[in-house]
Image (cartoon, rainbow, N blue to C red):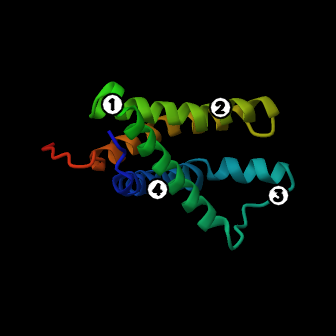
């Protein structure tokens, strides 16, 4: 069966919006003081540059599309539905956030509690994003009632 790329992009945009909103809440509200403190200790500030917002929005959309693409790719093996979406979300979380959290903890540049909070938060973020994106995805010619 062929992947429906239009639906991957559409579902990926929805998943990317979920990721973007979640990342704003996590980093702009929940961990804001932690980021300010960690950056101050490194001699940096949180002053955004002109490309800061476009890069983060692009990153979240790209990650959302990747999660839905992964869902579409593993769907023939695991079947359509939330269980497969959970698998895709968890796999994306491992590939992106868990491995980055391990690397960042190993570097020792950020407080471990901050890294742990981020890694735990993003688990839920990617599961919800994958479920949202998978809800939109359909194979070519597929008609489903959900």
What's the residue at 67%, 36% (across, down)?
100
Which numbered disc, 1 or 4, marks the residue that appears first in the sequence? Answer: 4
Whole-angstrom CA distance, mark 4 to mark 2, is: 22 Å
Instruction: Say which of marks 2 and 1 sits in front.
Output: 1
What's the residue at 27%, 34% (across, down)?
80
Which numbered disc, 2 or 3, marks the residue that appears first in the sequence? Answer: 3
Q: Position of residue 115 (x, y in %)?
A: 66, 36
Which numbered disc, 4 or 3, marks the residue that appears first in the sequence? Answer: 4
Which numbered disc, 4 or 2, marks the residue that appears first in the sequence? Answer: 4
Whole-angstrom CA distance, mark 2 to mark 1, is: 27 Å
Whole-angstrom CA distance, mark 1 to mark 3, is: 47 Å
Q: Is residue 76 visible?
A: yes
Whole-angstrom CA distance, mark 2 to mark 3, is: 25 Å
Q: Position of residue 53 (x, y in %)?
A: 60, 66
Q: Which mark is residue 44?
A: 3
Check disc 2 and report its element: helix, strand or loop.
Answer: helix
What's the residue at 73%, 32% (across, down)?
103
Residue at far left of view: 145
Q: In terms of depth relative to the viewer, which is nearer, 115 or 10?
A: 10
**CB atoms of marks 4 and 2 within 8 Å:** no
Q: Position of residue 109 (x, y in %)?
A: 80, 39
Check disc 4 and report its element: helix, strand or loop.
Answer: helix
Q: Which mark is residue 99?
A: 2
Neighbor class of circle 2 (other Cα within 10 Å; few <14, some 14-19, many 20+) is: few
Quadrant assignment, res 44: bottom right
**CB atoms of marks 1 and 4 within 8 Å:** no
Q: On the rendered structure, is 4 left or right of 141?
A: right
Quadrant assignment, res 36: bottom right
To which residue does mark 4 refer? 21
To which residue does mark 1 refer? 76
């Amino acid at each position: 069966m062929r992947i429906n790329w239009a639906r991957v992009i559409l579902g990926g945009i929805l998943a990317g919006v979920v990721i973007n909103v979640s990342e704003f809440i996590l980093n702009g509200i929940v961990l804001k003081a932690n980021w300010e403190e960690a950056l101050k200790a490194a001699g940096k500030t949180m002053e955004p540059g002109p490309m800061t917002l476009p890069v983060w929005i692009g990153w979240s959309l790209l990650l959302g599309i990747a999660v839905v693409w992964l869902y579409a790719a593993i769907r023939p093996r695991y079947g359509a539905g939330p269980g497969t979406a959970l698998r895709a979300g968890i796999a994306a979380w491992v590939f992106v956030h868990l491995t980055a959290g391990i690397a960042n903890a190993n570097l020792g540049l950020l407080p471990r509690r901050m890294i742990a909070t981020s890694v735990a938060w993003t688990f839920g973020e990617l599961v919800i994003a994958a479920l949202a994106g998978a809800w939109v995805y359909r194979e070519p010619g597929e008609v489903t009632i959900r």
